[in-house]
Image (spheres, rainbow, N blue to C red):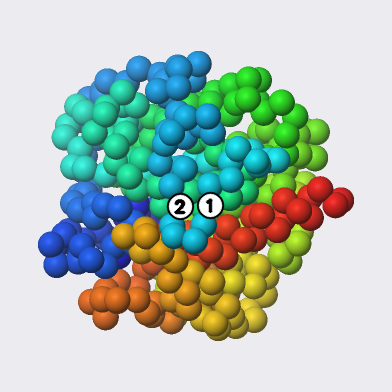
Amino acid sequence: MFQHSCFDPSNFYHLTRCKVMNATKYLSLFVTSLAFACTTQREALVGNSSVPPAPDYTQTASWAALPDQLDAADIVPKGMEDRQKDGEVDVFFVHPTIYTQQREDGEPWNADVQNAKMNKKVDDSAIRFQSSIFNGVGRVYAPRYRQAHISAYWIKEPELQKRIFDLAYSDVRRAFQYYLDNYNQGRPIVIASHSQGTTHTRRLLKEFFDSTNLRNRLVVAYLVGMPVEKNYLENIPPCDRPEQTGCFCSWRTYLRGHYPEIHQKGNNIVSTNPLNWSTDTLYASRELNKGAVLRSFNKVIPRVCDAQVYDGLLWVNKPKFPGSFLYNNPNYHIGDFNLFYANVRENALARVGYFWKR
C-alpha cells in the first residue's frame, strides 16, 4: 500500500502500534516504493549513543534532490513532465521518517547521512513518490538530514527526546540557511514536508518566515502528516481556498469513522481537504480526485478516493485500486500525499500563478 513512516501523526510525540507486514503478500498494494516492516517496540533508554557526523551542505552528496543533478525528484509518472528547468519558484522538501529498522542499544538515535543503504531508501521512497509531485512547479531541493529514529517519538525522557529532534532540526535549519545563501537568489518558495519532515518544517516556518520579510516570498506550505494547530503561526494562516497564497495546508488521512488512538474531539488542528482545498466539512467526491500514484509509479490512477474534513482529520472512504480489498488498515498516513498526487501537483502550480498576480 502506501509507504513511509509507521507512526500515528495524531499526537506530536505518539506512535501507533506498528504491524510487521508480510511484504510478499502485500507488495502489489504499496503506493510507494518500499514496504518497510515496522518492528519497533518500546525500549528502555540505556547509556549514551554516538552521534553521526553532520552533513556538509556545500557537498551535493548531502542533498537528496537538487535541480541541477539527476535524482529521484526528477522522475514523473506517464503523462507528466519534469519542469524544474523552467520553474520560477523553488520547492524546499523535507522527507519523513525512513530510519525505521530495529534500533539496538547504543546505536545512534539519529540516522547517518553517509549511510548509502539509508540514502537509497530515502531516494526510492519519499523523494521519488512525494517530492516529485513538485517538479512540475519549481526547482526541488531536498536535504539529507540526521532524521530521528522512529522510536524517538515515544521515548519517555523528554530531555533526551528533545536533543534527538533538535539535532535533526539543526540539520534542516542549516540546509535551509545554505539554500537561502547559495541557491535561492530571491525566488518565491514552496515548503513541503511529510510526517517527521513536518515536525521540522513547522519550526522552520516559525523561525524563518512567520515574523520576517521572507514571509513575503512564501507561496504556500504543505505541512502534511503531522498535526499543526490553527494558531501555531502568528502571521501565516491556514489556507482555506485554492487560490490563497502565503498560507499553509495540512491533513492526516484516515478511513471514514476512524479516530487515531490519541485524539481530542473539537481540537484546534488544521485539516485541509486536498480535493477542494477547503478547511470546512464540505464533502468532496472521488470524482474530484485527479489521480493517485501507486507503487509502479508508471501512471496516475484517478478517482481512487473521496475526502471530507471531520474534527481535525481527513476522512476518506476505502480507496479503490487494484488489490485494495486486501488493505485493511484504517490509518492512511503513509498515503497522505500519494492518494492526492495529481491534485497537490495541480494546486501547487495554481498557487504559484496566483502568487505572481498578487
Q: Which mark is residue 76?
A: 2
Q: Are marks 2 and 1 in contact (CB under 8 Å)?
A: yes
Quarter holding residue 118: top left
Residue 198 appears in the rendering: no
**Identity of the residue furthest to the right in this view:** 358
Mark 1 lies on a secondary structure that is: loop
Write the residue at 67% across / 28% down: 184
Write the residue at 67% across / 70% down: 278
Q: Position of residue 174 (x, y in %)?
A: 54, 23
Q: Where 146 sits versus 233, above or below? A: above
User: 200 or 161, which lies in front?
Assistant: 200
Q: Where 71 sits versus 317, above or below? A: above
Question: Does label 2 or label 1 sit earlier along the sequence?
Answer: 2
Q: Amino acid at mark 2?
A: Val
Q: Amino acid at mark 1?
A: Glu
Q: Where 342 sits versus 104, above or below? A: below
Quarter holding residue 258: bottom left
Write the residue at 58% across / 78% down: 288
Pointer 1 residue: 81
Mark 2 lies on a secondary structure that is: loop
Residue 37 appears in the rendering: yes
Question: How many callouts does the rendering have?
Answer: 2
